[in-house]
Amino acid sequence: MSNEELSKVGLKTFINIMHQWDVEQNKQSVILGLDIQEVLKESALGNEVILPDASLIRISHIIRIYKSLRMIFASENQANAWIHKPNASFDGNSALKVILGGKISDLEKVSGYLQGQVDIDLG
């Protein structure tokens, strides 16, 4: 898959997940590590959009978080709501607040935590 195709699919998946999680565009920019409005504008104009590697890594963590939540919770509503709820494992902060720290390591923290929960459930 070319970088352009990977970026196009990754961006579409990211936007769909953000919509399901009800995350505003300004917060999406923090999570993605670049101005989402500018990226969407370029895409809508038909311009080739190639996301930086760091943004693709961020998207991969968002997809891991999304998939883990779907494995943990029976209900889509529960899975989508979890990201907004306080969590003792994150010092009482929501996973979204952790992710909005803006670093890849913040995404790794949440995706790693959820992977651990999936492993417990499957173990």
Image: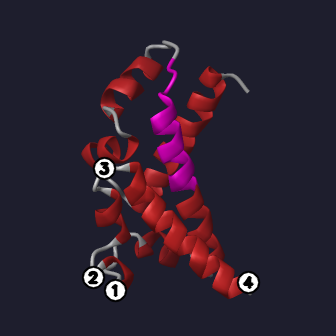
Instruction: Mark 4 and mark 3 in contact? Answer it, CB < 8 Å.
Output: no
- In the image, the segment drawn in magenta is 49-63
Mark 1 or mark 3, earlier in chain = 1
Taking depth in this image into account, of 10 and 52 the one nearest to the observer is 52
The quadrant of the rendering that contains the C terminus is bottom right
The way the protein has been coloured in the rendering is secondary structure
Amino acid type indicated by mark 2? Gly
Q: Position of residue 92 (x, y in %)?
A: 27, 82
Q: Position of residue 27 (x, y in %)?
A: 28, 49
Task: Give me the C-alpha separation between circle 1 and circle 4.
Answer: 22 Å
Give the residue at mark 2.
92
Q: Is residue 95 visible?
A: yes
Taking depth in this image into account, of 119 and 45 the one nearest to the observer is 119
Residue in the picture at 34% in, 86% down: 88
Give the residue at mark 4.
122
Amino acid type indicated by mark 3? Gly
